[in-house]
Amino acid sequence: MPTAMNDAAGEHLSVPLAALLSRKDLALRPLVTPDVPDSPVIRGAHASEMCDPFPSLLGEMLLTAGVHVPRPSEAEESGSRFDSYVSGVVAAGGAALGFGLEPVHDRVPPALVAACEKHGLPLVEVPPQTTFAALVREVWQLIARARTEEVRRVSEAQQSLAAATSAADPVASVLRRLAARLDAHAALYGPRGTQIASAGREPPAESRAVLSDLARFVTDHATTTATDTVAGVRLSAYALGPGEEGFVLGLAARHREPGDQTIASVAAVLLALLTADRHSGTGDARSAALVRLLLGASPEEVAPLLGGGEWSVIHARPDTGTVDAAAAGALGAALGSSLVDVVEGAGGVRDAVRILVPACRKASAQPGWTLGVSAAVTARHWPAADAQASLALTRALGTRTPLISQTTADVLAVLAADAGTEAQARALLAPIHAVPALAETLRTWLSLHGSWDRTAVALSVHRNTVRQRVSRCAGMLDADLDDPDIRMGLWFALRQTCTSGEQVSS
């Protein structure tokens, strides 16, 4: 049965048990090695002498010195106890068991070995000279190296896939590179599960049939992703567009490495953009928007061609080197937008990227990049959002933070320090300026030091109306009006927009 997932399944980094056993300085001796095609993998290690440590196991290697294990004279009669202990570790998701020799035991109890063989749990003998602390440290060092390798592999794949979009046949090129990167079969399915293109070694007929069924399952059930496994082949389907008329990316692979999910997701975004351009007129809409802007139209007039709604601006800078078109395209794809602009800095060096992203796509940190993200605004306030993103990127670079998003508090801090930042003020107050009565009520309330009664008299409304309007302002601006710094910043913002000709009115 296919498994539907509305969110991409997270991947947990792990290391093969064999990598730990290969360390000669640890002198580990495997006593039980299950007969499986791939080496067992572990996601961490910790020591516990509890009789019932099972709730804390999440694919980890459990280390024990056997304090709770019967003495050798009693061990032969405790087979059921060992069986219960090992079965519990397996049921809790334990990946392996490490048994330390001395000071309690001078050998691993045979009944424990038998129980591990029965339940298929890898068992490793840990010699006295190898401390559990050293063993745990080595596991985490191996995982850290695996994480570094994953980041490098994903970054290279992103650049390669983005470069493929500039080929003569970009869809086929992306599929070929994706299949090569994942050592998988990649296929593009059109509406109603019809295969349009494919690349990579063909899977068995049964797997192909199930993969086609998965493609239909995704569109029929309006899910983002669906997975299944047939005869050891792992099958995945990724929706590339909404509804029954959307396209689907299908993957069939016998092996799965860390980072494969991320690479497949990048390819899915690229293919979604390519298929949208070809079959839904998105590319034509973007061209029309550009032409209208060049001929004098305002951003708010052309925004509906791009999908309307609210947008965020993202400024990004690579951690090393300059930016090329492939890297910029890959970053845009990872963030969910093809509206990418490579920026030239001092001396004509292309060292930054600006991306216009629909607000529904939440920005996340990207390996090898530092990001500054603006607040979500309508098209009218894109220039202000651009300024916000620039400030956020400057802060991110200065604090060595991978991603900083501009919040209401951030904008207000800037306004309080420099009341001349009109663009920031306009973007901040955009939600309440759509309802003039709200802006005037907030301005009046702030000018009267938060007095409900005096504000009601000044506006000729009931004091409860003042409370309701101010509460709405707080919610729409995501601002804590009990904070004096926030109130001061809002006062500066309201004064700035008023003095610039955008007077509030009742």
Image (cartoon, helix red, strand yellow):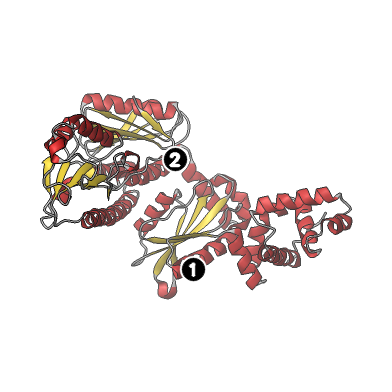
Q: Is residue 114 visible?
A: yes
Which quarter shows the C terminus?
Answer: bottom right
Residue 146: where, in percent of width, then height?
25, 53
Depth order, front residue of 54/272: 54
Q: Report if residue 194 is visible in the image.
A: no
Residue 465 left/right relative to 487: right
| Quarter occupied by residue 214 | top left
Identify which residue, 451 or 455, lies in the foreground.
451
Residue at image location 65% in from the left, 70% down from the top: 416
Query: Where is residue 380 shown, x and y percent of the image?
Result: 63, 55
Q: Which residue has dot 2 on it?
A: 276
Q: CA distance from mark 1 to mark 2?
A: 34 Å
Residue for point 21% across, 31% down:
83
> Residues at badges 1 and 2 in contact (C-beta under 8 Å)?
no
From the viewer's perspective, tell me whether residue 23 is left or right of residue 242: left
Q: Which residue position holds label 1?
A: 394
Q: Residue furthest bottom?
A: 347
- State which tag comes first along the sequence, 1 or 2: 2
Look at label 2 and name its amino acid: Ala
Q: Position of residue 17 (x, y in %)?
A: 18, 46
Count of picture labels: 2
- Camera-near label (1 vs 2) is 1
User: Taking 180 as reference, is 438 left or right?
Assistant: right
Q: Which amino acid type corresponds to the residue marked 1 in the rendered image?
A: Thr
Locate the N terminus and report the quarter of the image it occupies: top left
Name the secondary structure under disc 1: helix
Question: For residue 253, what is the image quadrant?
Answer: top left
Q: Find residue 320 and report its image quarter.
A: bottom left
